[in-house]
Image (spheres, rainbow, N blue to C red):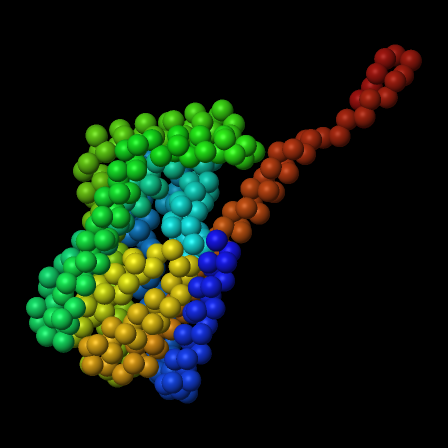
Amino acid sequence: MRRFETLILLLALSFYVWFLRRFGLADVLGYIRLVGWGLALTIALEAISRVANTLGWRVTINDYPRQLRFGELFLARISGEAIDYVTPTAQLGGQFVMAMMVRRKLAMAVGLATVVVASLAEAVGQIGFISTALITALPFEARLHHLFWPMMAGLAIAICLTAAFFAIQMRHPFSMLWKGAAKLHLGHLADPEVKAAADDADALLLDFYRRHRGRLALSCLCYLFAWSMGPLEIYILLTLLHQPATLVTVLLVEALGLLIERATFLIPAKLISQEGGKALILSLLGYPVDVGFAIGVLRRLKEMVWVLFGLAALAAHRMFNERAGAAAARPTRNVIEVPSAHGEQSL
């Protein structure tokens, strides 16, 4: 895995060096300066998407505990997304982080089950957005008609991956993971208590899909709304760069960009797919290539701000837990037993 990550990183760096030598670093920096404080607007817009994402997770939790505040759920969500962004875990690492961060107020089995359900809802919401965007915009953009079948193939792959993810959830995935951990003797993961939590999470998954389909549909709508913020961001960036921005353009840029990211989901931090994907798509639509690259860079800057927010929230959570654990382990008062003629006295 480390060799794979190193290879991807080298390829990404080579691509960036080639692009900047070909089209000029000055032009790209000029576009970034042109946006200026407009980048803060896209960062704020992303907050709306993150809140919608958190709501998508929130509605999957039946019998939501009163002591678990929405802000805590939000911080757990952005922390998990930050882990997914910087590591090639196919979202598994981020889901575990989310469940771990709220485990004091939400049972671990419930947390694991609901983040997995929410991930499925997020994928369904993404497919819904891509399908709607392509159906709405593609007929009006003749320059991309020759790519119709490749786009349909990419959409079909995304649907198949989502269907496979759902099928895995129906086959007791947490129990299978526990059995693997037990065979590998992975420390506390092989503990019987962890097995009980895994069994409970599997049971909760099956029960959710059988009894709470309305919650699943509502979660999908939350994620669909979150994905719909993407075209608005593209519109803002194109406008700030003094480029023509139409509804057809922004829908296609976002939908095709998501298809590219779907195909490269194992690559951490969207290396190559972010800047390269936007440069390719916008060039096909008649825009200067460096405009597409600049938009990819601006999006990465926005994402890195949110990654820093998430990692900071995770670090603060760990620090708080460590201090709470140390305080719990510390005796409330010091007692010294002193023998005396009349018995033992405590000082």
- Nearest the eye: 259 or 66: 259
- Left or right: 24 with respect to 61? right
Residue 202 x %, y %: 34, 30
Residue 73 x %, y %: 39, 45
Residue 225 x %, y %: 22, 55
> Residue sitting at 28 percent across and 74 percent down?
280
- Nearest the eye: 21 or 7: 7
Quick check: 212 above or below 345? below
Residue 284 visible to an observer of this rendering:
yes
Quick check: 102 above or below 85? above
- Left or right: 134 with respect to 200? left
Image quadrant assignment for residue 253: bottom left
Q: Quadrant of the C terminus?
A: top right
- Left or right: 308 with respect to 244? right
Q: Residue furthest right?
A: 341
- Nearest the eye: 199 or 230: 199
